[in-house]
């Protein structure tokens, strides 16, 4: 009881020293959020050169805008495909790196982290060079006998997928390290006992491994969904949403409205919708963790 009282007293003494940092943190976090929500109710009239209060008009325009619906569907494809493939490939890679039979495991683990160490802008520029019409990828395809290699960045059917490939490559290291950390917490005796009982590899993974690292998996899927849904750099640098809005995503569309078309209110409405979509993901994560 005395130790609990002492710890509580120490926390009370420490609280005044934390207040300045908390105030700064709240200011940095809350001020842009409040500003964004406020701007959603206004629009800029270029002819009158003034900002006008329009209420919920910007929100109503969202669901009447075919370009917004295109950006929303692209964002869903971009997020679901990227996160799903990142998890599947990273799980396979983490399982390999966790194998006791793999030689030079430490070296391979270090190499696996390289893409995560690079800034998104650098990754985007590197992959843009790879996907250029005269870039390394098309040069290899041409040398293999393909007379007309694809136009990866300018083909409406391929532009979004080139962005997805880039994002998957960049995100695999983080997911791999997280899964690897989870795998190393599993008791090897349980896995060995399952093998002795005749459990197959798939049964072991589904019934023992994955349930044992469930919380790690939830953290990975939540963080990757938030980061991917909000990702701006890759799409902007690779395709700028083109060609013909084929790879346009919500963050890029919000940027275009706010800073290119000078419709900050409409851009803020798109940003608020992004926030609401991500809140659904966070609420799902919290519910699953507390279950």
Image (cartoon, helix red, strand yellow):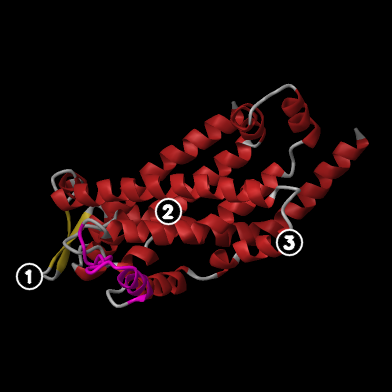
The structure residue drawn at horizontal position 52% and vertical position 36%, both measured from the top left corner, is 285
* Chief secondary structure of the magenta portion: loop
Work out whether mark 2 precedes mark 1 in sequence or the reverse, and give the earlier one: 1
- Structural crowding at the residue carrying mark 3, measured as other residues with C-alpha within 10 Å and reported as few (<14), some (14–19) or many (≥20): few
Query: Whole-percent x and y of residue 243?
Result: 19, 64
Query: Whole-percent x and y of residue 90?
Result: 55, 50
| Residue at the outermost front position | 145
Work out whether mark 1 precedes mark 3 in sequence or the reverse, and give the earlier one: 1
Secondary element type, mark 3: loop
Q: Which mark is residue 61?
A: none
Which residues are the magenta region? 135-156
- Give the labeled residue for mark 2: 228
- Give the labeled residue for mark 3: 104
Kindly report the distance in space between the C-alpha atoms of the residues bearing marks 3 and 2: 32 Å
Residue 139 in magenta stretch: yes
The structure residue drawn at horizontal position 33% and vertical position 61%, both measured from the top left corner, is 162
Residue 248 left/right relative to 216 = left
| Residue at the outermost top position | 197
Quadrant housing residue 261: bottom left
Q: Nearer the viewer, residue 148 or 32?
A: 148
- Give the labeled residue for mark 1: 47
- Structural crowding at the residue carrying mark 2, measured as other residues with C-alpha within 10 Å and reported as few (<14), some (14–19) or many (≥20): many
The structure residue drawn at horizontal position 65% and vertical position 34%, both measured from the top left corner, is 209
Which quarter of the image is occupied by the N terminus? top right
Secondary element type, mark 1: loop
Is residue 38 shown to the viewer in this render? no
């Amino acid at each position: 009881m005395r130790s609990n009282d002492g710890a509580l007293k120490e926390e009370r003494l420490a609280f005044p020293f934390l207040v300045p940092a908390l105030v700064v943190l709240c200011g940095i976090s809350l001020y842009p959020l409040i500003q964004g929500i406020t701007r959603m109710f206004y629009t800029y009239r270029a002819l009158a050169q003034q900002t006008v209060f329009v209420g919920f008009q910007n929100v109503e325009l969202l669901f009447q805008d075919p370009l917004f619906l295109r950006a929303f569907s692209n964002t869903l494809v971009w997020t679901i495909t990227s996160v799903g493939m990142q998890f599947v490939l990273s799980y396979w890679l983490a399982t390999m790196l966790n194998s006791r039979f793999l030689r030079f495991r430490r070296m391979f683990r270090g190499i696996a982290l390289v893409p995560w160490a690079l800034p998104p802008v650098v990754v985007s520029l590197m992959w843009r060079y790879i996907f250029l019409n005269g870039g390394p990828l098309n040069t290899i395809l041409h040398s293999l006998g393909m007379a007309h290699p694809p136009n990866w960045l300018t083909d409406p059917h391929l532009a979004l997928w080139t962005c997805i490939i880039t994002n998957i490559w960049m995100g695999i290291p983080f997911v791999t390290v997280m899964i690897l950390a989870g795998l190393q917490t599993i008791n090897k005796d349980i896995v060995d006992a399952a093998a002795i009982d005749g459990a197959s590899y798939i049964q072991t993974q589904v019934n023992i491994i994955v349930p044992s690292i469930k919380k790690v998996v939830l953290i990975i899927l939540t963080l990757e969904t938030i980061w991917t849904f909000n990702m701006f750099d890759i799409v902007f640098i690779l395709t700028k949403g083109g060609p013909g809005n084929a790879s346009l995503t919500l963050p890029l569309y919000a940027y275009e409205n706010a800073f290119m078309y000078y419709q900050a209110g409409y851009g803020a409405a798109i940003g608020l919708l992004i926030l609401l979509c991500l809140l659904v993901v966070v609420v799902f994560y919290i519910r699953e963790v507390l279950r």
